[in-house]
Amino acid sequence: MGGMFAGQLRGYRKILVNPAFHVSEFMRTQIGVHEFLNPRQDGKTQYEITSELCDAYQAIEKCQFEDLSPFDQNKTYALFGKNDTLVHGHDEFIAHYKKDNARWFEGEHRLNFEITKDIVVPLIHKIMKEEINLKSATKLFSVLLASKR
């Protein structure tokens, strides 16, 4: 679900990990009470999926690709686990975002330390380096323009 919500942040560079663009479809197969996978600070151990919750997600899904700017299309990246059995968002990602920004990794739906270290962190460094180079080039261009006067 995090990938779907992150994808709706406009004007930010972002990395979506195994984005599920149609969470409501999966949730409708899971109506009922479930155990949280990880301990929570508030001590709650269960959550409930209801039809109303699914409807709310479906409403969000309908507009998730509206108003994508060229910046958003070019600066949104996605990582897809080759062995993810929960969601399959690759084709939909490349239909709305830059195809070259979709990457596959050896893994499943959830990240582990190795994938974070070997795949996610290097991608963050790449994105940061591109931003630094862009800002440096812009400053240099401004200096060159100013020196021509």
Image: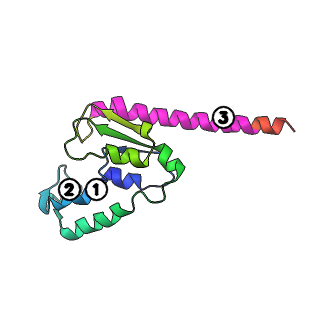
Q: CA distance from mark 1 to mark 3?
A: 39 Å
Q: Is residue 121 above or below residue 44?
A: above
Q: Is residue 27 visible?
A: yes
Element carrying mark 1: loop
Amino acid type shown at disc 2: Phe
Q: Residue 51 sits in which quadrant?
A: bottom left
Q: Which residues are magenta?
A: 113-142
Residue in the image at 59% along x and 33% along y:
133
Between residues 116 and 7, which one lies in front from this camera angle? 7
Quarter in which the C terminus is drawn = top right
Q: How dense is the environment of label 1, judged by Cα within 10 Å: few (below 14), some, or many (20 and up)?
A: some
Residue 74 image position (x, y, % from top left): 50, 44
Residue bearing the label numbered 3: 137
Q: Is residue 45 above or below residue 149?
A: below
Residue bearing the label numbered 1: 22
Residue bearing the label numbered 2: 26
Q: CA distance from mark 2 to mark 1?
A: 7 Å
Element carrying mark 2: helix
Q: Residue 56 sits in which quadrant?
A: bottom left
Q: Are marks 2 and 1 in contact (CB under 8 Å)?
A: yes
